Image: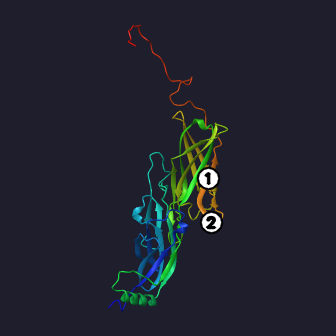
Amino acid sequence: MCYHHPHVASVQINADWTGFEKDRPSGMTVMVYSRSGDKVIEKQTNNTSFAIVDLLVGYYNSVVYNQSPEEYGTVEFRGMDKYPTAQVCASHIDSRWYKTRGEKEILAVSPEWIGTDRVEDIEITQRMVDITGENKLANMNTRDIVSDFIVARHHPENIIYTIGIKVHLKNVYNLKSARASLDGMAEGFMFSTGMTTESEVTHLLENWRLVVDKNDPTMGYIEASITSFGLPCNHKGLPDENKFNLSVLLVDNKTIIDFPFEVGDKFVFKKDEAGKLILECEIELLAKDPLPDVKPEGTGNDGFDAWVEDWGEEENFDLEI
């Protein structure tokens, strides 16, 4: 009887991943919320082109993102049962060497690539419900899942930024290792607004690459990169909103020097030839003070660390050659 008097409309939600700028995902999640904000449907599918969902008459908002929550290891999905609170955030971590400054500072891991998009005010009419019933009745002997209605066309884009940092140093031959922290970065992304959260986290930069100047071996730079949700939605571009603290260990394996920088005004978002925003930003800094000269670990005053003890009494041996 329900084929003659259906209650829901089978509708299609499409997704075009060409703007994701990463490898096409192997799956996607579709979230549908009622106008009141309550979650109606959560569907994971390996078909990244479209999904068929059944909806009652009314108005809805839909969200699409790549993969499923269980496939991520560096982010957490929070408040997903309500449209206004649905968000994805970088997972929190602890550090053996970095000491947080108070209870409010949170350390977070670099998040994986995420592509997402939202479509609001999707209308499901009684006419859609009636046609769905007619189609099901006509195809009740087949397993084909079809829909006459494409109600949302999503165009997911990457919401993760690459943050590159380069620090120029003098007397780089004294450098053994480096580690750093960058605070004031967005903790996550709100699906309902398409904006980053106001909440902030600190990211650690522990893997650095050293490049020595070919013409002047005393000069060079170190560089590192992380991924991030970017800047908080209420960021004003002021220098003290983001603090970058670099700590370097010298070759004597005991001298540690800290270089504090304020970089809230250093973020630059580039555009490609077509004028599209490239999801990268680079911070280039210059350490004013050169690294002090120190003796490498394990060396004496003359650059050697070896000695010869007394030989003892002379003894003669016959050797066969």
Hey, what amino acid is under mark 1? Ile
Q: Residue under label 1, please give it.
A: 283
Q: x, y percentage for residue 71?
A: 41, 62
Q: How is the rendered protein coloured? A: rainbow
The one nearer the camera, 65 or 140, is: 140
Q: x, y percentage for residue 211?
A: 60, 43
* Vertical comparison of 216 with 276: above or below: above
Q: Residue under label 2, please give it.
A: 276
The picture quadrant where one finds residue 222 is: top right
Residue at image x 44%, y 73%? 31
Q: Image check: 196 left or right of 33?
A: right
Q: Earlier in the sequence, mark 1 or mark 2?
A: 2
* Vertical comparison of 27 with 55: above or below: above
Q: x, y percentage for residue 13?
A: 47, 77
The one nearer the camera, 239 or 162, is: 162
Hey, what amino acid is under mark 2? Lys
Q: Secondary structure at mark 1?
A: strand
Residue at image x 56%, y 48%? 245
The one nearer the camera, 180 or 113, is: 113
Find the distance from the CA under tag 1 to the CA under tag 2: 20 Å
Q: Secondary structure at mark 2?
A: loop
Q: Are marks 1 and 2 in contact (CB under 8 Å)?
A: no
Q: Quadrant of the C terminus?
A: top left
Residue 84 appears in the figure: no
Residue 218, labelled with which disc?
A: none
